[in-house]
Image (cartoon, rainbow, N blue to C red):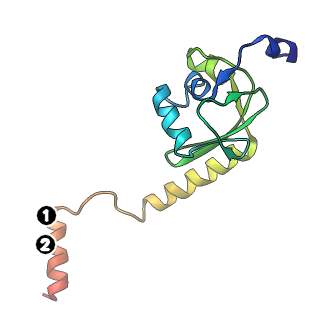
Amino acid sequence: MTAEHAADQQPVRLDKWLWAARFFKTRSLAKQAIESGHVRYGGERSKVSKDVEIGARLRIRQGWDEVEVVVRGLSDQRRGAPEARRLYEETAESQERRASQRLQREAAQGLVSPQRPTKQQRRALQRLKRGA
């Protein structure tokens, strides 16, 4: 997108841009994330009504992942995922960090049992505690 083409576009609010770029399903979810500090604009907390500029760096935390993107286009309309993907570019550092954190989570998954013990396992633990 050229600079003169970008100058022709109307300003887009941060919550609308996040919704159009498909980071959040609804604008109200985007608003909640911005207000709770899960979205950083240029390294700082911002308001929902902040106008997004091309070239701005955003840090967006969603669940386990924190994505750092550079704004490449503006849109206030939600479209398909391939078109939404053209609105931003994820930084290389962010991709590497997310990949390493994913591998750490997968490695730790085997150490922690995500489920409650079964009745049989509970009885075995009780026998073990009693020393029988």
Q: What percent of the width, then of the height, locates residue 129?
A: 19, 84
- Left or right of 82 in this view: 73: right
Mark 1 closeness class: few <14, some 14–19, many ≥20 residues within 10 Å: few
Quarter holding the C terminus?
A: bottom left
| Residue 59 sits above or below residue 7 on the image | below
The kind of residue tagged 2 is Arg
Q: Which residue is mark 1?
A: 119
Quadrant assignment, res 5:
top right
Q: What percent of the width, then of the height, locates residue 91?
A: 74, 40
Depth check: give the residue in front, 132 or 130: 130
Check if mark 1's residue and mark 2's residue have beta carbons within 8 Å.
Answer: yes
Which residue is depicted at the point 46% across and 26% down? 26
Query: SS of the residue at dot 2?
Result: helix
Mark 2 closeness class: few <14, some 14–19, many ≥20 residues within 10 Å: few
Which residue is depicted at the point 42% across and 61% down? 110
Q: What percent of the width, then of the height, locates residue 30?
A: 52, 32
Q: What percent of the width, then of the height, locates residue 69?
A: 70, 36
- Left or right of 54 in this view: 18: left
Which residue is depicted at the point 17% across and 74% down? 124
Quadrant assignment, res 7:
top right
Q: Which residue is mark 2?
A: 123
| Residue 45 sits above or below residue 114 on the image | above
Depth check: give the residue in front, 69 or 95: 69
Distance of label 1 from label 2 (alpha carbons): 6 Å
- Left or right of 2 in this view: 83: left
Quarter holding the N terminus?
A: top right
Query: SS of the residue at dot 1?
Result: helix
The kind of residue tagged 1 is Lys
Which residue is depicted at the point 52% across and 45% down? 36
